[in-house]
Structures are given as structure tokens and as C-alpha cells.
Image: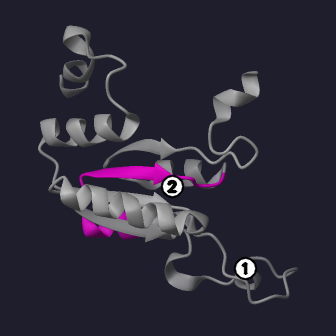
Amino acid sequence: MAASELIDNGRAGSLSRLQEIIEYAKLRGYREIGCAYCYGMEKDAGRLREILVAAGFVPHMVSCTVDQVLEKDLDPTKIKDTISCNPLGQAHKLNQIGVELTLLMGLCLGHDMLLQKNLVMDFTTFVVKDRVHQHNPIAALG
């Protein structure tokens, strides 16, 4: 019902993806909004947080580096102390917080799938990672 309200009465194409998400969340009565984001989008995630607060939501931003898991602890062939992405940790944290909607923001392919399989709330993609096309994967269709 809430989704149809966003496109009924000639509104299709009149809202940005972010505006749609905000309006949808308000129609559903959501207050707690989660965001699972790539550390490389830290600045963008901060801006999204500000926009969600201004729209009346309580945002919970969870970076892919949550829990500071070292790559070498996951893969014995790694020797550097590089922090690994942790989509399972992101899902666990967002589930634990109890957010009502999670936005995916620039997660790596595969990591997004692991996250989605483990979330217990509604979720949607806000940004798809595509470094070649500035996060606009449809541009590859030429």
C-alpha cells in the first residue's frame, strides 16, 4: 500500500530515490532507519545521516568495518593488519539495534547478498557500488 502511494496519481518519476525512501518510511511509520555502508562512502553516509535526522528519523549508520575484524584472522594467507569488510557484523548490529528499515549504501557485490540474507527487517538499496560508472551501473548498458 505505501509503495503504491508513491507512484499513484502521476507521481512516478517526480521523486528522487532518497525522497522516495523518506516518504515510504514515513508512510510505514518507521522511525529507526539503519544504513549498512561501505567505509569508502563515509562522507556520503555522514550526509545521509544528516538528511535522515532532518526528516525526523533516528539513523543508525553501520560501516562495513564494524567490529574491526582483521583480514588475516579470516584468511591465513593474508599477512597485513588490514581491516576486513564485515557484512555479517553489519547485519548482526542492525538486527540487534532493531531498526525498522535498512538502506544499503555502496556495499561490494557479494557482501550485499550476505547482508540481505541475514537482515530481519525491511531493506532496500540506496547506492549500488560501481566504481567505473560513479555508482550508476545502468551506464554500462551504453
Task: Give the amino acid type for the residue marked by disc 1 in the picture.
Answer: Glu
First in sequence: mark 1 vs mark 2: 1
Which range of residues does the magenta coloring cover? 93-108
**Residue 107 rendering spot, x and y as whole percentages:** 58, 55
Which label was assigned to residue 92? none
For label 2, the crowd category at 10 Å Cα-Cα, with few meaning under 14, some 14 to 19 and many 20 or more, is many
Task: Determine whether 63 is above or below 104 in the image.
Answer: below
- The quadrant holding residue 87 is bottom right
The residue carrying mark 1 is 71
Residue shown at 73%/79% (left/top)?
71
Q: What is the quadrant of the N terminus in the image?
A: top left
Q: Which residue is mark 2?
A: 115
Disc 2 is placed on an element classified as: helix
Q: x, y percentage for residue 62? A: 43, 69
Cβ–Cβ below 8 Å for labels 1 and 2?
Answer: no
Query: Picture coordinates of residue 118 (x, y %)?
Result: 45, 54
